[in-house]
């Protein structure tokens, strides 16, 4: 039997009637952009994540980009980020005119290492030296595992740095009993169809505990104005449509059940793979991992992936090339070897089916 890395048809089949009814209701309403479903979804997500404001957007990348702008990142600034993540973490920085400044990851969680961040802030560690102020930090909750927000936020506050969480893969994950996305200044989520809470198209969310930041995010997503046809600053067109909001409202009602199922599959993997000679994912004490991916470390990663494919089991590699050696960022002056943990993860990580 073939086992794909993901099968969204299975998810749709289980809730088809509810989804179809929700979409049909939007079609019949004639209201397709920033309507009642968007407003209701934002309120429901704010309650689910225990944040003051939840502002939907057209994509997770837009949430990162506008989140960075909302906290004051501008051209010439520096933004700390891990090199082992999806490229959108860094391109969102580039869209502001700022430059990403990378710091290495923890080998067990794949997340930003507070010790590496401290080194970079002190002007030490690997990588080029940049002129400019470090304005923000982007901890990525990779694969659904919360980053060490206690230490990272403390470092940020000590250096007067804003914290923009990349929680694209981690909706519902918790750190010290609190949901990610409400631990820094702005939290950013993706509703890309493959995410744990996925739309039937693109979508994103920015969250904050700060009312003023929430108002700023609202202005930025609709051309930078407080009222129609009056524009106070450079804004953007980043609106979630009503159909996607209606779909997400249905799916949000199942998210906790789906997360529990992912965690049960992860536990089964742990039991079945114990002693198999591979490194299994860790769970940070006091945190809840939501397993967007079940990422193992395998020394002969490419060989294992090939042999699993021969047996009909599809796997995936997230991510094969760290950002500091991507052609896009060659001009920043990084070199192979600057971030050994990120590079080793890129050689060894293999993600198994967990839908």
Image (cartoon, helix red, strand yellow):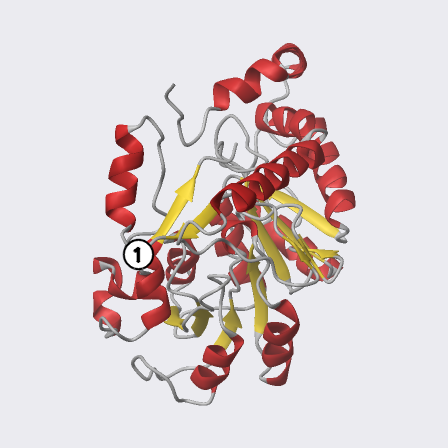
- Please, is residue 250 above or below residue 344 in the view? above
Depth check, front residue: 352 or 132: 352
Image-quadrant location for residue 174: bottom right
Q: The N terminus lies in which quarter of the figure?
A: top left
Q: Where does residue 49 sit, x and y in percent of width and height?
A: 73, 48
Placement of 302 over or under 36, stated as above or below: below
Residue 167 place in picture, x, y as percent: 56, 52
The residue depicted at 65 percent of the width and 28 percent of the height is 251
Residue drawn at the location 29% of the way across and 52% of the way down = 320
Examine the rendered structure and indicate whether residue 122 appears above or below residue 297: below
Between 237 and 286, the one lying in front of the other is 286
Q: Residue furthest front?
A: 275
210 or 139: nearer the viewer:
139
The picture places residue 195, in percent across and down from the top left corner, at 52, 38
Question: x%, y% of residue 206?
Answer: 61, 50
**Which residue sits at x=58%, y=71%?**
162
Look at mark 1 in the image and give the residue it sits on.
299
Name the residue rendered at 64%, 78% in the picture.
154
Q: In which quarter of the image is residue 311?
A: top left
Which type of secondary structure does the marked residue at label 1 adopt? loop
Residue 348 quadrant: bottom left
């Amino acid at each position: 039997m073939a086992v794909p890395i993901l099968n969204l048809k299975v998810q749709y089949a289980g809730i088809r009637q509810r989804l179809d009814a929700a979409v049909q209701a939007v079609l019949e309403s004639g209201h397709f952009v920033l309507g009642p479903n968007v407003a209701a979804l934002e309120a429901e997500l704010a309650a689910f994540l225990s944040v003051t404001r939840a502002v939907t957007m057209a994509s997770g990348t837009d949430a990162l980009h506008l989140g960075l702008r909302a906290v004051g990142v501008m051209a010439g600034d520096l933004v700390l980020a891990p090199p082992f993540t999806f490229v959108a973490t860094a391109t969102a920085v580039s869209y502001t005119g700022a430059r990403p400044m990378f710091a290495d990851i923890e080998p067990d969680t794949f997340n930003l290492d507070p010790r590496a961040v401290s080194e970079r802030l002190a002007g030490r560690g690997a990588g080029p030296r940049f002129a400019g102020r470090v304005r923000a930090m982007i901890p990525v909750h990779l694969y659904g595992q919360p980053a060490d927000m206690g230490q990272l936020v403390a470092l940020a506050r000590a250096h007067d740095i804003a914290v923009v969480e990349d929680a694209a893969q981690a909706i519902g994950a918790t750190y010290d009993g609190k949901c990610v996305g409400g631990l820094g200044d702005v939290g950013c989520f993706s509703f890309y169809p493959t995410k744990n809470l996925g739309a039937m198209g693109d979508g994103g969310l920015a969250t904050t505990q700060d009312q003023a930041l929430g108002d700023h995010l609202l202005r930025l997503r609709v051309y930078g104005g407080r009222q129609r046809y009056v524009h106070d600053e450079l804004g953007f067109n980043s609106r979630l449509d009503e159909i996607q909001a209606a779909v997400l409202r249905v799916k949000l009602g199942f998210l906790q059940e789906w997360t529990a199922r992912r965690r049960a599959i992860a536990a089964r993997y742990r039991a079945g793979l114990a002693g198999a000679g591979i490194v299994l994912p860790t769970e940070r004490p006091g945190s809840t991992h939501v397993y967007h991916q079940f990422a193992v470390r395998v020394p002969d990663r490419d060989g294992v992936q090939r042999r699993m494919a021969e047996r009909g089991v599809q796997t995936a590699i997230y991510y094969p090339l760290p950002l500091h050696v991507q052609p896009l960022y060659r001009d920043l002056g990084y070199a192979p070897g600057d971030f050994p943990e990120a590079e080793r993860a890129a050689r060894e990580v293999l993600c198994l089916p967990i839908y």
